[in-house]
Amino acid sequence: MAGSGPAPKDPSRRQRRNKDTVPQTVLKWESAEAPELPEFRIERGGDLVEFV
């Protein structure tokens, strides 16, 4: 029975339209060398020793 029930909503007023709300950003991958890390020393038995 056609015509029973409310009319469909206007598509521009729908909450969910299954589209991205934020534009997609493509990041370029670049290979890089690892930076040099600072020396790290701890106190062991009253002396500072390099932590490895």
Image (tube, grey):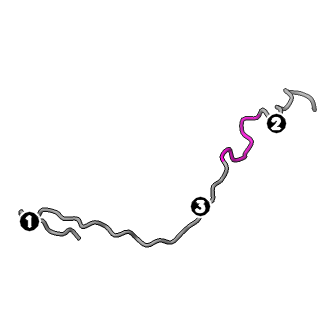
Residue that mark 3 sits on: 27
What residue lies at 89% left-to-right and 27% top-to-bottom?
4
Disc 2 marks which amino acid? Pro
The circle on residue 11 is 2
Q: Residue furthest right?
A: 2
Give the quadrant of residue 21. top right
Disc 1 marks which amino acid? Asp
Give the extent of the magenta segment: 14-22
Q: In what element is the residue under mark 3?
A: loop
Residue 41 within the magenta-colored segment of the rendering: no
Disc 3 marks which amino acid? Leu
Residue that mark 1 sits on: 47
What residue lies at 23% left-to-right and 65% top-to-bottom?
40
Answer above or below: position of 50 versus 26: below
Image coordinates of residue 9 in percent, x first then y, are 82, 31
- Toward the viewer: 18 or 27? 27
Mark 3–mark 1 CB contact (< 8 Å): no
Q: In what element is the residue under mark 1?
A: strand
Q: CA distance from mark 2 to mark 1?
A: 74 Å
